[in-house]
Amino acid sequence: MAVNTAGTGLEERWRDILSVHARTICEIDRVLHPHGLGASDFEVLDILATESPREGDQCRVQNLVGRVHLSQSALSRLIGRLEKDGLVERSVCVEDRRGVWVSLTRKGRDLHAEVLPLQREVLARTLAE
């Protein structure tokens, strides 16, 4: 029986993508670990820094759900850990009591600025290969 070469090409490309993703995440975890962060932690801080560029700006947690590759419950736990570490603050949305706002603290902004070049260097190196 003949092998479907079109399907094989897609599978190989998919596995290449997964391989690059895994190597990149592992490398980001490695360089951020001494700073007490993992790749997912950084991703949340980075999105918050982008979405809420000024101190005191807030972002709805719901807006993070589709952008961070975690389940809603895993994201909630991660935000809880970041809050415990003093990197973010959560508050209830006055307009919609089901909604939750999250914002970077000064400590979170400072840590993000410190590790941003490390994460970007990993991206430049691993994605250029």
Image (cartoon, rainbow, N blue to C red):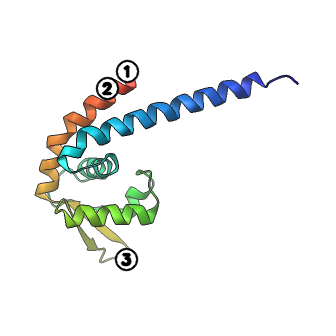
- Does residue 32 appear in this view? yes
- Does residue 60 appear in this view? no
Q: Which quadrant holds residue 77?
A: bottom left
Which residue is at the front of the view, 26 or 67?
26
Which residue is at the front of the view, 76 or 31?
31
Work out how far the residue at label 1 is from the one at label 2, CA to CA, in angstroms.
Answer: 6 Å
Query: Is tag 2's residue or tag 3's residue first in the polypeptide sequence?
Result: 3
Q: How far across and how far down the image is residue 52, in percent?
A: 24, 53
**Label 2 CA crowd tier, 10 Å (few <14, some 14–19, many 20+):** few
Which residue is at the front of the view, 52 or 124?
124
Name, please, the residue furthest toward the right: 1
Q: Is residue 105 left or right of residue 121?
A: left
- Label 1 sits on what residue type? Ala
- Label 3 sits on what residue type? Asp
Residue assigned mark 1:
128
Q: Secondary structure at mark 1?
A: helix
Q: Is residue 94 left or right of residue 108?
A: right
Are the residues tagged 1 and 3 within 8 Å (C-beta)?
A: no
Work out how far the residue at label 2 is from the one at label 3, CA to CA, in angstroms.
Answer: 40 Å
Work out how far the residue at label 1 is from the one at label 3, CA to CA, in angstroms.
Answer: 44 Å
Q: How far across and how far down the image is residue 86, in percent?
A: 16, 63
Residue 57 numbered tag: none
Q: Secondary structure at mark 3?
A: loop
The C terminus - image quarter:
top left
Residue assigned mark 3:
96
Q: Nearer the viewer, mark 2 or mark 3?
A: 2
